[in-house]
Image: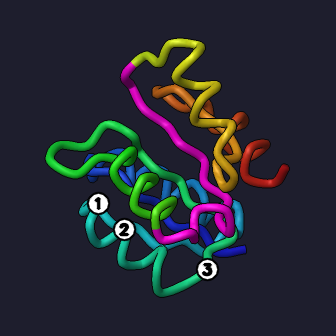
Amino acid sequence: MSLLIVDDNQDITDLLSKFLTSKGFENVVTNDPREGLKRIREKKYDVVLLDISMPEFSGIDIIKKLEREKILKDQKILIFSAVGFTTKETNDLLKKDGIQGCLKKPIHLNELLTAITS
């Protein structure tokens, strides 16, 4: 299973990458959201872990671009953020084809594993 992790916080991506590697998951990390978008366009990942709150170009911007390009529906994206979402905002995101779940930071690693393998 191949995963793409897109988060501007290198400490978080380092931790997630090490944890997922220890569990046998192949993963690629980028701390640049534009690079994350480019990678999603170039390769189909089994799961994309996408931070929503990134400066200048957010996870929401990535989702909107993928939606406009009609490739969002072909993804399995798990979104996560430290920023609290309202129930309506979360439900609106989860209604989009391609968005498979929403996790809040700090991420509980067991929850992450369950979300990835579901």
Over which residues does the magenta segment extend?
69-83
Q: Is residue 117 magenta?
A: no
Q: Amino acid at mark 3?
A: Lys
Query: Would you name the residue on which mark 3 appears?
Result: 44
Residue 43, percent from left and from top: 54, 85
Which residue occupies 48% across, 71% down? 69
What residue occupies the far bottom of the structure in this picture? 42
Compared with 55, 102 (above or below) is: above
The image quarter in which residue 48 lies: bottom right
In primary-sequence order, the first of circles 1 and 3 is 1
In-front residue for pair 12/60: 60
Query: Would you name the residue on which mark 2 appears?
Result: 36
* Residues at discs 2 and 3 in contact (Cβ within 8 Å): no
Residue 12, percent from left and from top: 37, 45
Which residue occupies 59% across, 68% down? 3
Compared with 84, 93 (above or below) is: below
Q: Amino acid at mark 1?
A: Pro
Spatial separation of the CA atoms under disc 1 and disc 3: 17 Å
What residue occupies the far right of the structure in this picture? 118
Residue 28, percent from left and from top: 47, 73
Q: Secondary structure at mark 2?
A: helix
Query: Would you name the residue on which mark 1 appears?
Result: 33
